[in-house]
Amino acid sequence: MELEKLINSLSALMSVTGHEGNGKAELESLIGAGFDESFTDAVGNRFFVKRCGREGAPKILIDAHMDEIGLIVSDIKDDGFLTVAPIGGVDLRTLQAGDVVIYGKEKIFGVVGSTPPHLRRPDEGNSLKEATELLIDTGYSKEKLSELVRIGTPVGFKPVYRHLFGSRIAGKGFDDKSCAACAVMGISRVAREELAGDVYLMLSSREETGMFGGAAPGAYSIAPDYAMVIDVNLGKTPDTSKSETVAVGGGASLTLCPVTDRTMNKKLIALAKEKEIKTQVCVTGGSTGTNASAVNLAGAGIPCVDVGLPLKGMHTATEVLDLEDAESVAALVALFVSTKDLTEVTA
C-alpha cells in the first residue's frame, strides 16, 4: 500500500481518546500482515511486533500515539440536539458549524450548530462558546436519537481527505496516525535479516489527555533497549514564530533536548545526511511535548529520539501535511530499525 493511502486509511479510523480499540479489526487488516504478532495491553496500547530471528537481539521500540482529539456526548436534548464535552485540545475556533460523526449503535452524521448573527444578544459579541455550550444537530427526534446514542458516546470529526497543491494533503486525524503510517511503512521496507533487533511498534493510547498516558506503562512492559517516538510537529505558518515551529516541506524533524539521547541524535543526523534523507533539527529546553518524556523515564530509563512530522492546522479537521515530509519520516524509521550500535558511544 502506498504511504498516502495508508495515512488516509489509518487517519479515518475513529480513535478518540479512550476509544482507541474502536477500529481494532480494521487496524489489523490494514497493517497486521506485515508483522509477526500483535496484542493489546491493559491501557489500550496496540503492539505490532516484527522479529529479526536472532537470539538475544536488542528490542527496538517505535511509538506513535493512536488516539485523537474529539468530543463525548454529555446530554440528549429535544429536537435531536446533543451537548458534548471536549476530549483533548480541541480548537474551539474550528468547531462551530463543523461536520461531526456520532459513533453510537450506528454512525450518525451531525453538524455543530451556530447561532445566526441576527439572533445574538448584544452582550455576546463575537466571543466563542465553550465546547460544553455547543449543540450538535442530528435531525433526529429525541426519542429516536435516544435509541441510537447514550451519554458517553464518542464524537469525532467527519473523515474527509483532499489534495492541496503539489504533495500537500489535508484531513482529520493526522495527529498522530499519519506518523503511525510512516512507522509502518518504514518498518515494512526493512527485510527481517536486515533488522538491528526485534521491532515493537506501539500505537499508544491516551496521549491527547496527558503525556504520561499509555506510553509510560507500554514502554515499561516492553523494556526496549532504545526507542524512537514519532509525533506531528508544529508546522510554520505566516502567523507563527519560526523559533516555535518547523518548516513544512523541510523534512522530518529531530528534537535536541534534555529528554532525547545525544548519541543517537548525533548518529541519526549524520546517517540521514549520508543517505540523503531530508531532515531538520529543532531544539527545546525541556519536554518535547510528546511521548518522548514518558518513554525516556519508563522503568530504569530508555534512551530515545524524538522525530516529528511537520503539520499545519494541528487539532482541527483540516490538518495539512506534506507527503514528502512523510516519506522522510518513513525513511528515518527504516534507518533507525536497521542500524546497529546506535546507542554505542564512540570517540
Image (tube, rainbow, N blue to C red):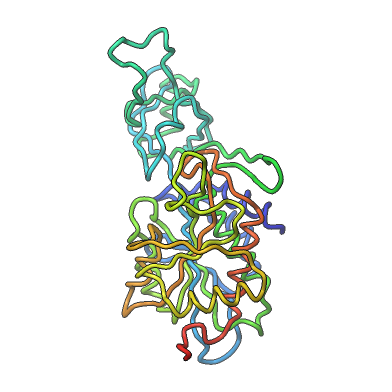
Residue at 52%, 38% in the rendered image: 317
Residue at 36%, 25% in the rendered image: 128
Residue at 35%, 66% in the rendered image: 294
Total marks placed: 0
Residue closest to the far left: 123
Task: State the quadrant of the N terminus.
Answer: bottom right
Residue at 36%, 22% in the rendered image: 77
Q: Name above or below for residue 124 compared with residue 54.
A: above
Rendered location of residue 274, percent (x, y): 65, 76
Specify whether 96 is left or right of 199: left
Q: Nearer the viewer, residue 347 or 29?
A: 347
Residue 177 falls in which quadrant of the image?
A: bottom right
Rendered location of residue 218, percent (x, y): 39, 68
Rendered location of residue 148, percent (x, y): 46, 32
Q: Name above or below for residue 239 compared with residue 306.
A: above
Q: Nearer the viewer, residue 315 or 154?
A: 315
Q: Name above or below for residue 316 compared with residue 232.
A: above
Q: Nearer the viewer, residue 78 or 232?
A: 232
Rendered location of residue 176, percent (x, y): 50, 54
